Amino acid sequence: MTIAAAALLFTGCSNDDDNNDSSSSASATTMPATTTPATTSEHEMGNESGAATETKIATQNGEIAVAGQVLAKYNETGGPTGALGEPTGAAVSGPDGGSCQEFTAGLICWSEQTGSHVVWGDIRQEWENSGGVNSKLGYPTTDEKDISGGKQSDFTGGSISWNASDRKTTVTEK
């Protein structure tokens, strides 16, 4: 993985147009997933359980692996037929030993300190515009949650809320 590709993921390369509605579904066509032994270390992919697992998803761009705690969160959200859709690229290492992997409708970021969490839609766009995991906001600490009038995601350095009526986001740093 080149440094340029890693920099794009962690500084804002989103082109998704998700409306922050967790019930929306991905429009990508997916093919059956296969499970194979992991080829990367458990710690590198965020798998601290001792079970080195990896799933390869067949996409239009070839097979893309999803592994470790990112795989666990991906499966929790429905896998390739869920709201995130299929992976669009390999996981990319982030600061403090964490990683993020992009999917057609959002991304999953993991760090040992925060666990795995989904970031998508307008909140993701605002987070990436702020610098993503390399910003003061850092890694996500919660999945998107409902709040009065919208949605919110919390991060190690603050939170981003989204207002459903005007689709505006508000960043609150700690």
Image (cartoon, rainbow, N blue to C red):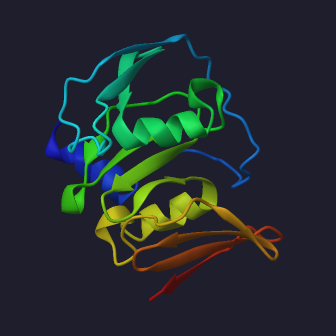
Residue found at the very far front of the displayed protein: 50
Point out residue 29 in the picture as x, y percentages from the top left corner. 62, 17
State the image coordinates of residue 172 (x, y, percent, origin top left): 53, 85
Residue 16 image-quadrant placement: top right
Q: Which quadrant would the C terminus be assigned to in this image?
A: bottom left
Q: Residue at x 33, y 42 (%)?
A: 49
Front-most of residues 129 and 35: 35
Q: Residue at x 66, y 37 (%)?
A: 83
Of residues 35 and 159, the one nearer the viewer is: 35
* Labels in figure, total: 0
Residue at left offset 34%, top offset 27% = 53
Relative to 115, is 122 on the left or the right? Answer: right
Residue 54 to residue 84: above or below: above
> Taking the image as drawn, is residue 31 in sight?
yes
Position in image of residue 85 (x %, y %) = 58, 31
Left or right relative to 16: residue 27:
right
Residue 137 % position (x, y): 40, 75
Residue nearest the observer in this picture, 117 or 8: 117
Residue lying at the far bottom in this picture: please name it: 174
From this view, report whether residue 18 is shown above or below residue 27.
below
| Nearer-the-camera pick, 23 or 165 | 23
Q: Quadrant of the N terminus?
A: top left
Seen at 46% across and 30% down, the residue is 87
Above or below: residue 134 compared with residue 92: below
Would residue 104 be visible to someone looking at this image?
A: no
134 on left or right of 78: left
